[in-house]
Image (cartoon, grey):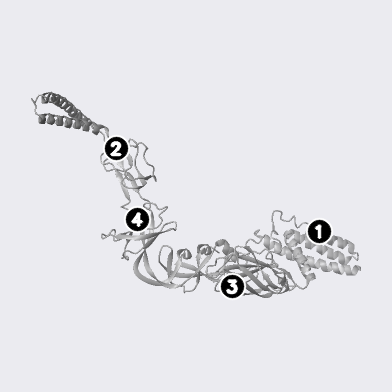
Amino acid sequence: MIIRLAAALRALALLLALAAASAAGSVALAHEGHSHGVEAPALPAQTTPRAEAASASFELVAVASGDRIRFYLDRFASNEPVNGAEITIETPDGPAEARAVGDGVYEIAAPWLARGHRYDLLATVTADSTMDVLALDLHLPELAAAAMPVQAEASAWLANLRRHLTHQGPIGAAAGGFLLGLAVIMLVRSRRALPAFAVLALTLTLLLGTAALAHEGHDHEKNGPGEGEAASVQGVALTAPTAVSVERARRLPGGAVFVPKSTQRLLALRTGLTGIADHRRTVELPGRVIADPNASGVVQSSVGGRLAPPPGGFPNLGTRVRKGEVLATVTPPVQAVDLSDMRQTQGDLDQQIAITGRKVARYERLATTGAVAQTALEDARAELTGLKDRRAALDTIRRAPEELIAPVDGVVAERAAVAGQMAAAGTMVFRIVDPDKLYVEALSFVGLEPGAAATARLPDGRTLALASRGAGLADRNQAVPVQFAITGSAEGVRLGQFVTVMAPTGETIGGLAVPRAGVVRTESGAVVYEHVSAERFEPRPVRVEPLDAEQLIVAGGLGAGRRVVVQGAELLDQVR
C-alpha cells in the first residue's frame, strides 16, 4: 500500500514539477516588460465557426456560439438587414424555426453541435413575398476529447492548475519546484509516506491557495478560461465554440478588410450594384451664392444727413419687410450760411405776404363798388397764395427728414444704421434680399451646354438644384461668368457662400456611376471597396470623373455588376 502511494506521489510530484518549470518559464516571458499579453498577435479574422450563403435576393451568415447558432440576414444588393423574415433551418434534429433577436439577427438552439464537427444546414428564407433556399456548410474544430468526459475533466483541471501556476511569478514557481523536489527526496529516503504527503499538500496549498493574491490588481482572468482559449490534452487542441466570442474588424495581410456582420450593423455599411451607362460629361466650377437682381435691393440715402429710426425702431437682421415700408429717416443738416440766407428769405417773404394781404383786403372792398375789376382781385389773391406756399416750403426744408423705404419684399440681409449717424449721399443703409430667390454665379473655362440644369455642392455635403440663367460675353480673369437660379430649397444658404457647381458640357461619357460617399481619397488616388463576400471587402483603385453633386463616374478600374460600398467607406478605410 505504501509503495503504491509513494509511486503515485512520485508521479504527481514529477508532473507538478514539470508544470511549475513550464509556468516559471512562461511567467518570466510574460513579465518581461510587464506586457501581460497586451502586445499579443491580432486575433484571427474568424474567431468563431461560421458559414455563409447568398442568392440574388439575400445574404445569410451563420455563426456558431456555444450551443446556439446566430443567423445574420441581409439584402444581397444593398447589405441592408432584413427584419420580419421567416427562417426555417433543417438541422440534424429536424427543422427549427429561427427567432428574431436583433436587427436582421435570428437565432436557434443547437445542442447537437457537440456531436460532430461538420454540418450541412439548409435554410429556407421567406421575406417580403420572396422565398429562397440557402445551403450552409458549417465546420467546427474537431474535439478530440468530446467522447471522453473523464479525460476532458482532467484536461480542464490541468489547464486550471497551469493557469494558477502561471500567475505565481518566477519566484513562486521556483519555490514550488524546490518544495516538490524536496518532497521527492523524502519519498525516496523514507518509507513513511505521511511526512512527504504533508509536504506535498503544503506545496499545493501554497501554489493554489495564493494564486488569487499574486499580482493583486491585475485581473488576468477577467474573461474566464472559455473565451478564445484552447486547452490541450496530449497535444490535441480543444477549441469548442464559446457563448461569448471576441469578433472585431481587421485588415488582412493582402489589404482586404474582414468585418463581421455584427460590426457591419454598427457601422451601417450599405452597398450598391454598379452598372455601365452613358452619362453627360460635367465639369466642376468654383461658384458663390449671390442675390437675384429682381428680388433684392439696397436702401440708400439720396442726401447727406443724420440717421434716425422710424417709430418702430430700425429692423433687425433677418427681419422680413414689405415693399414701401419705412426703415429709417435722414435729416439733412443746415449750414450756418444757408441758415442765414433762409432767414433773410423768410423775412422777405413775410413782408411780401403782409403787403399782398393788405392789397387783397383793399381790392375786396373796392370790388363791391366796381372801382376795382374782379380780375385784379383774383390776381392779388393768387399772388398771396404763392407767397404763403414759398414760406411754408422753407419751413418744411428745415423740419421734414427724408424717409428711407424698402424697395422689394424680403428680409434684411445687411444693416449699417445707427441712430445719430451722419450718412453721406449714396451710403447703403440696408440690403434687402428674398431668401427664396437666390442665384449662383460661377466661372467657367470651357463651353457649357446652353440652358442645361446643373447641381451645386455645399461645403457641408448638401446639394442644390440649379437652372441656367445665362452666361456673360465678357471674360473675367480668362473665364466666362455664368449664372444659375436655385430652383429647390435654399434653406440655410447664405449670400457669398462658396459652392462647387457641376455643370454639363453637352458631351457624353460611358462608365459606372457611384456615390461620392463610396469613393475614398488616399495618397495613391481614389479607392472604392468591393463587397466580395459576406464579411470581406476588397479595396479597388479606380479613376473617377465628376458626374454631379452626388455621384462620380468610375472611368477605369472596376467592372459592371460589382457590389460597391456606398455608405461607410470612410469607416472601412480606417480599419487596421
- The reply to whether callout 1 and callout 4 are in contact (CB within 8 Å) is no
- The answer to whether any part of residue 481 appears in the image is no
The residue that mark 4 highlights is 439
Hey, which residue is sitting farthest left in the picture?
A: 371
The answer to whether the residue labelled 2 contacts the one labelled 3, judged by CB atoms less than 8 Å apart, is no
For residue 154, what is the image quadrant? bottom right
Give the CA separation, mark 2 to mark 3: 79 Å
Marks 3,1: beta carbons within 8 A: no
Residue hosting label 1:
205
Residue that label 3 marks: 131
Q: Quadrant of residue 392?
A: top left
Name the residue rendered at 32%, 62% in the picture.
Answer: 444
Q: In the displayed structure, would residue 326 be above or below residue 36?
A: above
Q: Three-letter amino acid code at disc 4?
A: Tyr
Mark 1 nearby-residue class (10 Å; few <14, some 14–19, many ≥20): few
Q: Position of residue 203 (x, y in %)?
A: 81, 60
Q: Secondary structure at mark 2?
A: strand
Provide the secondary structure element on which disc 1 rests. helix
